[in-house]
Image (spheres, rainbow, N blue to C red):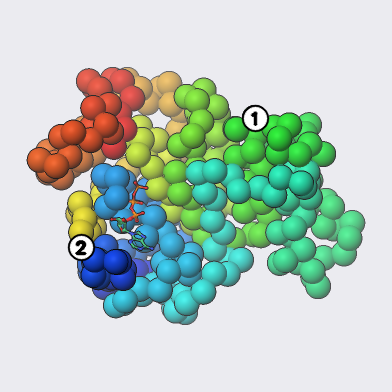
Amino acid sequence: MSKPHLELSAVGIEFATPTGSFRALDNVNLKINQGEFISLIGHSGCGKSTVLNIVAGLYQASEGGALLDGREVNEPGPERAVVFQNHSLLPWLTAYENVELAVNQVFTRTMSKPEKREWIEHNLALVHMSHAIHKRPSELSGGMKQRVGIARALSMQPQVLLMDEPFGALDALTRAHLQDSLMEIQAQLGNTVIMITHDVDEAVLLSDRIVMMTNGPAATVGEVLTIELERPRNRLALADDPIYNRYRSEVLRFLYEKQRKVADIGDAKLDRIEPEGKRAVA
Ligand SMILES: Nc1ncnc2c1ncn2[C@@H]1O[C@H](COP(=O)(O)OP(=O)(O)OP(=O)(O)O)[C@@H](O)[C@H]1O
């Protein structure tokens, strides 16, 4: 069997807190192939961002670790770009200049000035932002800022795109447009993507596999669901697809039956469970 592109192997992490050490993750194992789209889903606070931060090289695992193409991940690197929920653009730079900053970091020696300009414009075009490349973040909507954040990440030509609830703060329509753009871009570029989401529909629509995490402390991978829906995927056609709805139910069952805790009952996020057919969030 071929080696996985990205591997998390027996990952555990303990955080030092004022009240003693806190074990957030325990024995997390995951093998991801090149070009796979993986969603991480689980209740709030279970450890999804911690997993992502370990892959990003921002956190160091206490045991085990992440391997990218057989090499240990110990620090951040441009081959693993991160997109956060809140775009994190520099407010005094235009969309173009925000992307330029990333391009200069990675391609200083390998691209000429005109090549860089073409590359920056190409990445902004990928996310449908060509019309606003000279605007500053304050002049852009939330969805547009998020598009620039994605363009910035893509412009580094990362092997792995790490997305922490990238569309969490957006309205439903903008979110749907960006999900469609992301599916198109990923089909075009073939990047490996790990995305954290609380949105069950988003996870099923976008993913090749959904990794469902158990509740913390000492959270781990609970179940992994392989989504065998043909691509390209069309959200409207899938809404009535029985196989799509079966996947959706399986994720919901995991989240609300297997992983339900008494302590969760007061959780506002659980209050947002909606009947079949409506949007469900974890
Ligand atoms: N730097 C840190 N120091 C101490 N505890 C931490 C640290 N980072 C995360 N934790 C704890 O580890 C657990 C997992 O946090 P994490 O942010 O990974 O959860 P999450 O699943 O991403 O949550 P959410 O869905 O709410 O964003 C939480 O209990 C959190 O309080």
- Tell me which label, 1 or 2, sits earlier in the chain: 1
Q: Residues within 10 Å of mark 1 (few under 14, many from 20)?
A: few
Residue at which label 2 appears:
218
Residue extending farthest to the front is 18
Depth check: 67 or 260 in front? 260
* Quadrant observed for ligand 1 in the rendered image: bottom left
Mark 1: which secondary structure?
loop
Label disc, if present, on residue 10 of the rendered structure: none
Which residue sits at x=68%, y=55%? Answer: 155
Per the model, the C-alpha gap separating discs 1 and 2 is 38 Å
Residue at which label 1 appears:
141
Left/right placement of residue 120 relative to residue 163 reads: right
Respond yes or no on whether mark 2 lies under 8 Å from ligand 1: no
In this view, 54 is above or below 211: below
Which residue sits at x=40%, y=35%? Answer: 202
Amino acid under disc 2: Ala
Dividing the picture into quadrants, the one containing residue 110 is bottom right
Place of residue 67 in the rendered image (x, y in percent of width and height, measured from the top left): 42, 74
Mark 2: which secondary structure?
loop
Left/right placement of residue 230 relative to residue 109 reads: left
Which residue sits at x=70%, y=59%? Answer: 102
Dividing the picture into quadrants, the one containing residue 145 is top right
Evaluate whether residue 130 shows in this view.
no
In this view, 244 is above or below 61: above
